[in-house]
Image (cartoon, helix red, strand yellow):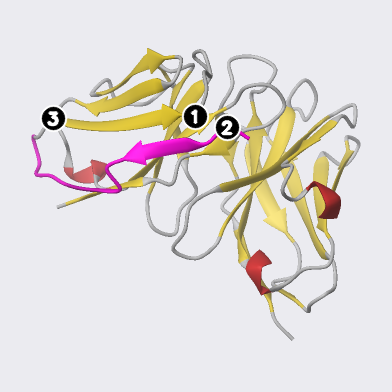
């Protein structure tokens, strides 16, 4: 079955750029949207944005000015860049398969990766 | 942005109880609503999509209902494995937002 794995630095200094990659295994990256979601410790879920295999993106309006997503179908990977990070960006970051183009919902999730923003 | 409000924030229940969690949207989301279960240190798990469709592999004691702005997640008979935090999510248009979560505890 499809599995997702996030990777990237666990510590980022402000105001640098947070960069994460999600690798898709056990299935195709095509014909689906792929989302990033984050969760600060002890808090709720915040959707960051999604990308389609064509490169089409939708971003959370509150983060749009700092977010860039990209996809590399040959490597079955999609990526997140978040610029000008502050301590408020410290969170567990998840990637997920997004059924936006069909029934909706996020049906496959990575295990999550913790990113701490600190100097 | 569409705001999602869940109630209650915390729910105390016992094994065997019927549990109901509500989610209200700030504007109509039709049936574009999902429910997730999250346990500590784990990723969320999709339970319900399109307001009332049960995700494959999810026990039938979970059910969802509602449309427009008001939605409900029901657990017909709470099991020990069901103590967790539950989130609703709307996914209309090009954006999506989550409710703040409901923690189901003993």
Whether the residues at callouts 1 and 2 have beta carbons within 8 Å, the answer is: yes
Residue A48 drawn at (x, y percent): 69, 46
Side (left or right) of B41 relative to A56: left
Residue A49 drawn at (x, y percent): 73, 41
Q: CA distance from mark 1 to mark 2?
A: 6 Å
Residue in the picture at 25% in, 26% down:
B74
3 or 2: mark nearer the eye: 2
Chain holding disc 3: B
The image quadrant of residue B91 is top right
The image quadrant of residue B6 is top left
Q: Which residue is mark 3?
A: B18
Side (left or right) of B101 relative to A6: left
Magenta region: which residues?
B1-16
* Frontmost residue, B62 versus A108: B62
Q: Which residue is mark 1?
A: B26
SS at mark 3 in the image: loop
């Amino acid at each position: 079955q499809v599995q997702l794995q996030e990777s990237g630095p666990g510590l980022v200094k402000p105001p640098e750029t947070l960069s994460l990659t999600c690798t898709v295994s056990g299935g195709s990256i095509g014909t689906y949207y792929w989302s990033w979601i984050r969760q600060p410790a002890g808090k709720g879920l915040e959707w960051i944005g999604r990308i389609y295999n064509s490169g089409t993106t939708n971003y959370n309006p509150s983060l749009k000015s700092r977010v860039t997503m990209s996809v590399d179908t040959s490597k079955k990977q999609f990526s997140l860049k978040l610029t000008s990070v502050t301590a408020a960006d410290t969170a567990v970051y998840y990637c997920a398969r997004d059924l936006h183009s069909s029934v909706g919902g996020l049906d496959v999730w990575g295990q999550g990766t913790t990113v701490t923003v600190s100097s | 942005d569409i705001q999602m409000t869940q109630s209650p924030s915390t729910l105390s229940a016992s094994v065997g109880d019927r549990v109901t969690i509500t989610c209200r949207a700030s504007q109509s989301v039709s049936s574009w609503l999902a429910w997730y279960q999250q346990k500590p240190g784990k990723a969320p798990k999709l339970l319900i999509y399109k307001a009332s469709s049960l995700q494959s592999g999810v026990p039938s004691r979970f059910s969802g209902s509602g449309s427009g702005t008001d939605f409900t997640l029901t657990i017909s008979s709470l099991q020990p494995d069901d103590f967790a935090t539950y989130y609703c999510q709307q996914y209309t248009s090009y954006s999506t937002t989550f409710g703040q979560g409901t923690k189901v505890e003993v």
